Image: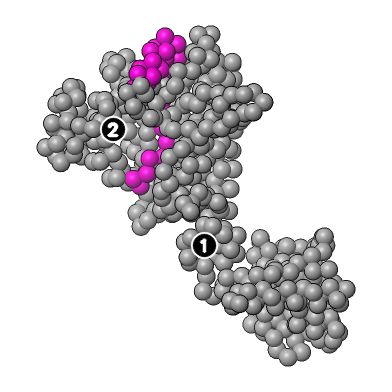
Amino acid sequence: MTETDERRAQRLSKMERLRELGIDPFPPRACLTHTAAQALAAHVPDAEQQPTVTVAGRLVSVRVMGKSTFAHLRDSSGAIQIYLQRDVLGESSYDVFRQQVDLGDFCQCTGELFVTRTGEITVRVTAWTFLGKALRPLPEKWHGLRDTETRYRQRYLDLLANDEVRDVFVKRTRIISAVRRFLDGRGCLEVETPTLQPIYGGANARPFTTYHNELERTLYLRIADELYLKRLIIGGLDRVYEIAHNFRNEGVSTRHNPEFTACEVYEAYADYHDMMALVEQMYSQVATEVLGTAVITYQGQTIDLTPPWRRITMRDAIFEAAGIDIEAHREFDGLVAAARERGLDLATQPTWGKAVEKLFDQFVEPNLVQPTFIVDYPIDISPLAKKKPDAPHLVERFEFFIAGLECGNAFTELNDPLDQRARFEQQAQAAAKGEDETQPLDEDFILALEHGMPPTGGLGFGIDRMVMLLTDQVSIREVILFPQLRD
């Protein structure tokens, strides 16, 4: 028997002993008056009589001093010290606590607040109730829980052992709430669109496939909600957004999880310049609301999210970083030759636009530390964006980058149904040649477009990456409670 098995057996024995004493080791309810934080705040300095409180939580420390015991109970608001005395509780009740209660168990304690000699606000317990038995010991608090595999696979232990982890996920909730407040303040309507879709679309990614038995049809978990949100613009909802889980059948890494959270925003009568203003205002406001400042530190780098952010074309960014003018090499072979001189082989890329994107990924993206909008992308890697009137081989699209992270993507949306059909057909041709990340032709979406869509600006950005940035985390797994892991 391992040490863990022995300790579990001991706890099982204590559980049975509690039952023998007429104490339910798993009672159905508690009856508390204060959280730990509320109890601490209820103490009145210098008052002759202090409030009586009933608190509950997990036992996280015990210090026995003969006929008295100091311990701490922790709930989600924090921890509070409790003080138990045999003379006050009686021998039987005190001994049950001493002998049958383990670290990790849940208890409820009632008593008057007082301050110890060391200045700690404490509950002088006059009555206590057992609330729940932990059959397995918790991680050693003073060692913390540092094994990465255990932290991700047993996140509940990670949250118990590491205060900084709990803080990340508290901030995540506050960040999402702040995003909602910002968008609601712009008059945007939060909506819900299908997770199961008959045709996947809105991004270039491989989908997860499932089958609906009753309908006898294949369905896909959404890779994006873009095409449904545009249908709502067509339907007269001029400003909409959705915070949703997307699913992409792709690799697992520090920046990618197959299931992730994204926010998409669409505004009628706007373009990609309007979306740039929205992004920089939103990031600055959310950071200030959650962190108290728009100047943050990420992996040792000071980053200022205050508007306005830098705007630079993809062409100029590549020229600055690699010395290659993509407009001087509009032919695929010429661009490949220019890149080869700088040690990058683009011959495997299927199109000129894909080659430009590879150049950008290699030479530009890792160095974009301060918030930057990269604008005007090749049309063949942007099948849902509107052409630039003065450069039809490019589109009105931007991505924004912070600390080397690609954080979001936006367009002036393509609202010409004939052009959109032609783009979908080009994607189909690419798929026939073996490309596995293409947009399928969505006839129902074309039908919707033919009923008319106003000029529209659209934006999609990753909630997980926003949280990574604002909590200084280098891995997406640190901001997703239950990330996907390899066996």
* Mark seen at residue 150: 1
Model colouring: one colour
Compared with 368, 69 (above or below) is below
Q: Position of residue 400 (x, y in %)?
A: 38, 36
Q: Residue at x 55, y 23 (%)?
A: 198
Horizontal side of residue 327 vs 89, given as left or right: left
Q: Is residue 429 magenta?
A: yes
Q: For the residue marked with disc 1, what is the amino acid?
A: Thr
Q: Is residue 435 visible?
A: yes
Q: Position of residue 79 (x, y in %)?
A: 66, 68
Horizontal side of residue 259 vs 81, given as left or right: left
Mark closest to the chain's N terminus, 1 or 2: 1
Compared with 422, 360 (above or below) is below
The residue at which mark 2 appears reads as 357
The segment highlighted magenta reads 403-430
Real-space Cα separation, disc 1 to disc 2, in angstroms: 37 Å
Q: Is residue 210 magenta?
A: no
Q: Nearer the viewer, residue 385 or 316?
A: 385
Q: Residue at x 14, y 36 (%)?
A: 340
Q: Position of residue 477 (x, y in %)?
A: 48, 52
